Image (cartoon, rainbow, N blue to C red):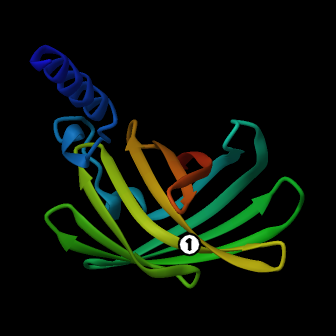
Amino acid sequence: MKRRIALLAAALTLTLAGCATPTPADYAAEKPQLDLRRYFDGELVAHGIFTDRSGKVVRRFTVQMTGTWQGAQGTLDERFTYSDGKTERRVWRLTDEGGGRWSGRADDVVGVAQGHAAGNALNWRYTLALPVDGKVWEVQFDDWMYLVDEHVMLNKARMSKFGVTLGEVTLSFTKR
């Protein structure tokens, strides 16, 4: 009986360890070092897709961005054009809180986005008010950005509601 309990405990421990999610600290030694103020300063373009939970691409888009900074305060003006011709705009107001911590606000973000950067990575967590079929859903984003080099950053964000994954956004940013 003790042996079964020990095996069950070991199996549970391995299962839980397999569910651990990465943290920004996991990337602390990665280069190049991500400096949001430097990367998101000036003109950028991003190309992206939204995939549903099955992995099917349901939306493609391009984002033209302009970043400006005044000390620790930044503005990132994002202008989206979707493959169906629809357009959107989101203006982020970013604040460097120090120690790799960031906060962000936008009109369609509920509350304040919280970010943590280390090494070449940044993790944002926020709730977005997303219009869907005439209603507004509050969905959660777990958003990861990885600086590849001084011009390219990759972004992968998981969108969920009530802990259930709805889909993923994948982006490739290019700094001009």
Q: In this rendered view, identify the residue nearer to me: 49 or 4.
A: 4
> Residue at point 75% right, 37% down?
56
Whether residue 6 is situated above or below residue 125 in the rendered picture? above
Q: Quadrant of residue 4?
A: top left
Q: Quadrant of residue 62?
A: bottom right
Q: Which residue is mark 1?
A: 128
Query: Residue 120 location in percent, x, y?
Result: 29, 43
- Examine the rendering and report whether any part of residue 16 can be seen: yes
10 Å crowding of disc 1: few (<14), some (14-19), many (20+): many
Q: Residue furthest right?
A: 84
At label 1, the amino acid type is Leu
- Examine the rendering and report whether any part of residue 175 can be seen: no
> Residue at point 58% right, 46% down?
171
Query: Residue 45 location in percent, x, y?
Result: 61, 54
Whether residue 4 is situated above or below residue 95 in the rendered picture? above
Query: Residue 104 location in percent, x, y?
Result: 39, 75
Determine the secondary structure under disc 1.
Answer: strand
Query: Residue 60 location in percent, x, y?
Result: 76, 48
Q: Residue furthest left?
A: 2
Q: Does 68 sit left or right of 78 as displayed?
A: left
Q: Does 145 sit left or right of 107 as displayed?
A: left
